[in-house]
Image (cartoon, grey):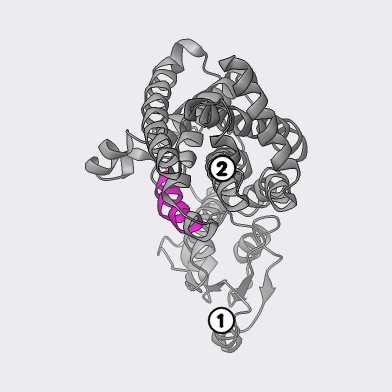
Amino acid sequence: MRLAHIATLGVKELRSLVRDPMMLVLIVYSFTIAIYSAATAMPETLSRAAISIVDEDRSPVSARISAAFYPPYFMPPSFITQSEMDARMDAGLDTFAIDIPPNFQRDLLAGRRPAIQLNVDATRMSQAFTGSGYIQTIISDEVTAFALRYRAVETPAVDLMLRARFNPVLKEAWFGAVMEVINQITMLSIILAGAALIREREHGTIEHLLVMPVTPFEIMTAKVWAMALVVLVATAIAITVVVQGALGVPIQGSVALFLAGAGVHVFATTSMGIFLGTVARSMPQFGLLLMLILLPLEMLSGGTTPRESMPVIVQFVMLAAPTTHFVMLAQAILYRGAGFSVVWPQFAALAVIGAALFGYAWMRFRSTIGAMA
């Protein structure tokens, strides 16, 4: 009867979730609007940056430089005078202001290496950092191409050919969408499992379970599989409808293999949610614990910053976190089209971590139930 008990209790959890409108709203929002907004509003993206140009040379080369700035990276440039430049920067009207000096073309053709001044509003840090590199590259390319028409320029012996793998257009939304799906899987699986246990305590139904012929193992397993099922179904819909459909992100590998990996990951994170639910006595306490746990899991897993950029001790400690292995697994499958022969170490690590978390959470849950009995 153990499997029948687990199945019946799991169906009860699903019915309880359906009767909780706020949780349903959270699930729908997390796997639709949250993914779309995070993917299309990446902070490092340069989009429609405000730029103005002070053209004191008014020559063909300065006109060529001015014409090189256009959407979607920059807004059409505003042509201003030198006296207006500082005032516009102070008022926040421009992020970038370019000052092309007088006689720039004459000095360029004479080989005097004239300088162009670039003023940047560094309070807009994300655009300032990325946009400065864009502007330097654009101006350098335009000046070099112009100079080649008028005087002999030594051709470099080596020409760098850039080939971007897995994201050839360097579109941040392709990366951001998948990483946000990973973050939402982790967050929702922990929240749903922990909230299911706390909801039992707050509604007083945990006492009803204690008088039934069920064991703590059956109660906990039912919560794990029910919440895992909800998260996996929502993930499949998000990958198909939001990531591939609305955002047009090409998925290189097998979605089924990714969902299998997500299932092992959710086994670990739902167990973590059960453990947090036994520690917290109310939903506000659970929310505070969630912030302490969730932020390090997401920030240090390698999804936001490559693990190689972190201190060695952080890399070593985070190997004990399921999110680290899930991020490696998801990126390998969805970005690079890896098969099971490549990602099986991550599957194994997630299974071991999940089993350890489940066992520890079960012991904690059993002692909590015993204390209430």
Image coordinates for residue 233, horizontal then vertical, percent: 69, 30
Quick check: can you spot residue 238? no
Q: Which residue is mark 2?
A: 207
Q: Relative to 266, is 372 above or below?
A: below
Image coordinates for residue 287, horizontal then vertical, percent: 51, 56
Residue at the spot 56% in from the left edge and 46% down from the top edge:
191
- SS at mark 1? helix
Between 246 and 16, the residue placed more toward the observer is: 16
Image coordinates for residue 98, horizontal then vertical, percent: 55, 71
Q: Which residue is mark 1?
A: 89
- SS at mark 2? helix
Mark 1 or 2, closer to the camera: 2
Q: Quadrant of the C terminus?
A: top left
- Give the mark nearer the N terminus: 1 vs 2: 1
Residue at the spot 51% in from the left edge and 75% down from the top edge:
101
Residue bounds of the magenta highlight: 287-299
Q: Residue furthest top?
A: 341
The image quadrant that residue 354 belongs to is top left
Give the amino acid type for the residue marked by disc 1 in the picture.
Met
Q: Quadrant of the N terminus?
A: top right
Tally of numbered discs: 2
Q: CA distance from mark 1 to mark 2?
A: 66 Å
Image coordinates for residue 202, horizontal then vertical, percent: 58, 53
Give the amino acid type for the residue marked by disc 2 in the picture.
Glu
